[in-house]
Amino acid sequence: FFPAALAMAVFPVLSKKDNQEFQQTITFGFQLALFISLPTLGGLFILAKDIISFIFGSNYANAYPGLQLISFAIPFNFLLLILVDALIALDKRKELLVYDLVVLVLNFGLNLLFVPQFSYFASSAITSISSFLSLIFAYWILKKYAPISLKEVKIFNYLLSTILMMILIYILPIHLILKVIIGALFYFLCLFILKDPLFAKLKKFEL
């Protein structure tokens, strides 16, 4: 839902096909996607066992590596849907269909090969790999038709804040829900301390 909502939000600007505005929108979209998806990935990865136990009970706790592996698909899907909407705006979405088919066949083949031995753990990992490949293909195609660059996309603040948040929620001996709340607040605090430009803009917008 959230990746699709973000992609839909930037689509009207992408449809204008102004090169400078197109680049700025892709940069902003990627920046916002990383702002949301990296802490989501980090939180799911660290809290996977607690989440599985909380929702399904302790008998299913051993399934947590599957959730950890598939969580890597989250940032890939956020970024992918932005690129897909950019291709739609340029009327080039159909070129990605061939690569979608390649990823689909690869996904199916890898599942046939590895699921019998590694069960849903393999399926989770393959899903994340497929999302990554789709992202690469989408960026490669878009690069042919739009002068885009990812040099202005800054990831350090979100990566550092996510890592610190992961450490904090890992060591806190409290209930899952409290970990989620404290982890989110701590993530925002880190971005505030780092004076992250996007976080500052969003904070002003809220005010």
Image: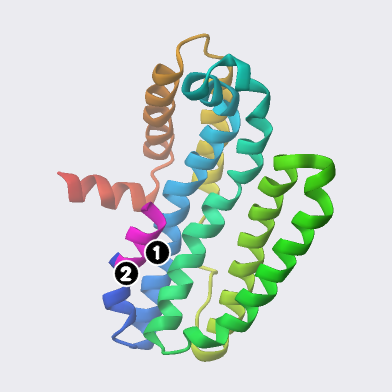
Q: Which residues are magenta?
A: 1-8
Q: Main secondary structure of the magenta part?
A: helix
Residue at image x 40%, y 20%?
177
Residue at the disc numbered 2: 10
Tell me the amino acid under the disc marked 2.
Val
Residue at image x 36%, y 28%?
185
Residue at the disc numbered 1: 29
**What is the basis of the colouring in this image?**
rainbow
Q: Is residue 191 visible?
A: yes
- Determine whether label 2 and label 1 are within 8 Å by CB: yes
Q: Determine the CA span between mark 2 and mark 1.
A: 7 Å
Image coords of residue 7 (percent x, y)? 37, 65
Q: Nearer the viewer, residue 161 or 140?
A: 140
Q: Nearer the viewer, residue 142 or 25?
A: 142
Q: Is residue 153 visible?
A: no
Tell me the amino acid under the disc marked 1.
Gly
Q: Nearer the viewer, residue 72 or 21?
A: 72
In this view, the residue farthest toward the top is 173
Where is residue 18, by image quadrant?
bottom left
